[in-house]
Image (spheres, rainbow, N blue to C red):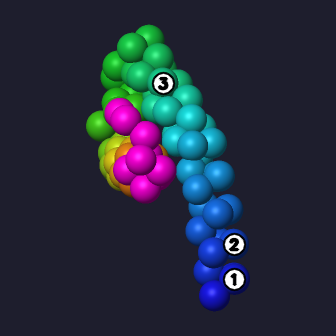
Amino acid sequence: MKIKMKIKSIFRKMLPHAVIIMMAMIATLCILDYYNPLMGFLTRGMSKALIFVCMVSVIIYVALKFGDKLKDGRKM
């Protein structure tokens, strides 16, 4: 049981950092695509997968933070 809680704690601490890194990668792809649209940086499969993973990570992070606030009884 303690291992599960420890993994959950590590996941909660790492998730915001992972989201920031993915957003920086997406911003870099947007800049590259703006300066060189013929390369199609945002239309490749890897870019779409990165955007999808980032979106899911943000949704999970927001759900965890919302759950924490509800559990603590703080107002939103």
Q: Position of residue 2 (x, y in %)?
A: 69, 83
- Can you say which quadrant of the picture contains the C terminus? top left
Q: Gap in Å between the C-alphas at discs 2 and 3?
A: 32 Å
Q: Is residue 74 magenta?
A: yes
Q: Which residue is mark 1?
A: 2
Q: Gap in Å between the C-alphas at discs 3 and 1?
A: 38 Å
Does residue 14 appear in the picture of this structure? yes
Query: Callout 1: few (<14), some (14-19), or many (20+) C-alpha neighbours within 10 Å?
Result: few
Instruction: State the residue at coordinates (60%, 61%).
Output: 11
Give the foreground label among 2 and 3. Answer: 2
Q: Residue most toward the front?
A: 73
Magenta segment: 68-76
Q: Given the image, on which type of amino acid does mark 3 rest?
A: Ala
Q: Which residue is mark 2?
A: 6
Instruction: State the residue at coordinates (63%, 75%).
Output: 5
- Tell me the tag on residue 27: 3
Is the Cβ of the residue at disc 1 closer than 8 Å to that at disc 2? yes
Secondary structure of residue under mark 1: helix
Q: Given the image, on which type of amino acid does mark 2 rest?
A: Lys
